[in-house]
Amino acid sequence: MTTTGSGSTYDPPADPAHGAARAAASAPAAARGHGPPRTDRRVALVTGASSGIGAATARRFAAGGWQLLLSGRDRRRLEETASGTSAVLLPADLAAPDGARMLAEAALRETGRIDVLVAGAGIGWAGPFLTMPHTDIDRVLFLDLNATLHLVREVLPAMVTAGDGRVVLVGSVAGSVGVREEAVYSAAKAGLAAFAEALRQELRGTGVGVTLVVPGPVETGFFARRGTPYRRSHPRPTSPGRVAAAVWNAVSQGRDEAYVPTWLTLPSRVRALTPGLYHKLLDRFG
């Protein structure tokens, strides 16, 4: 995942289905779309595309023939991700006021539609909660949770109006089990998981799906950027390409969840069946 802090910006330009459609109708015209689609190809907007999971996911969708809209903080690295493709670069600061709205408007202005949103931008912070500065609490919660929710809110009306689309949220195993010295990051990812479940229920019958991708540690610059390396022996870090493949397969198959690796579904099962054993294991390995 890629940090989306201050950096490059662009020039801004009763039943569940009924409820979602009504929300779409009340949204600004810019967020609902800009006339007929400008491409016959399927369109994916990928945030956090400067590196890591986002970059690998962008390349996988490009290989599948999709039109890409790539967003991230670093334009140079976005250009590297887009090399050899017809991707449109939309450098953005999702931490800025109206950052999500401006990105959604720019994306829809380019292609007239978004078929899939892969929300992969985020940051980490590691260390005892007692020493975590208040500013970092706010920053992690905003970038990992709030900014994603705002972006989904801006993109979703166009999907509901079209009666088709999928929102892919990149979560973390930390949101499933809670990780020692990553309390706020765990809280943000747990919030993302709950949001995915609730939104999925609201969108039933609209033609729009919600996928939560739950990776374990991934071999990216994420740990270096947060300032603390990954030191646990288990689970072993996986590759960004493996997560990207899981995203691609989940979108292709219309799946609600994808765990990478798949055995990461085990902790939640253990917790449900034998909570005592779960907490013992968490005390030892968490």
Image (spheres, grey):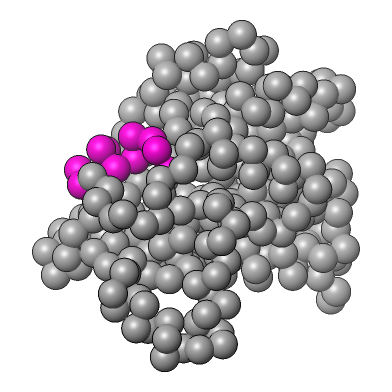
Q: Residue 90 at x, y = what percent?
A: 54, 24
In the image, taking residue 256 as reference, residue 214 lies left or right, namely left
Q: Quadrant of the N terminus?
A: top left
In the image, taking residue 6 as reference, residue 44 lies left or right, namely right
Q: Residue 136 at x, y = what percent?
A: 23, 54
Residue 126 against residue 12 in the figure, above or below: below
Q: Is residue 115 visible?
A: yes
Q: What residue is at 56 percent from the left and 87 percent from the top? A: 273
- In this orientation, which residue lies closer to the viewer: 235 or 24? 235
Q: Quadrant of the C terminus?
A: bottom left
Magenta stretch: residue 115 in it?
no
Q: What residue is at 29 percent from the left and 62 percent from the top? A: 182
- In this orientation, which residue lies closer to the viewer: 48 or 39? 48
Residue 176 against residue 252 in the figure, above or below: below
Q: Is residue 28 visible?
A: no
Residue 73 against residue 197 in the figure, above or below: above
Q: What residue is at 46 percent from the left and 43 percent from the top? A: 238
Q: Residue 183 at x, y = what percent?
A: 30, 67
* Residue found farthest to the top: 84
Magenta stretch: residue 226 in it?
yes
Q: Residue 176 at x, y = what percent?
A: 48, 68
Q: What residue is at 23 percent from the left and 55 percent from the top? A: 126
Image quarter of residue 201: bottom right
Q: Which residues are magenta?
A: 218-228
- In this orientation, which residue lies closer to the viewer: 10 or 72? 72
Residue 104 against residue 63 in the figure, above or below: below
* Residue found farthest to the left: 131
| Badge count | 0
Image quarter of residue 94: top left
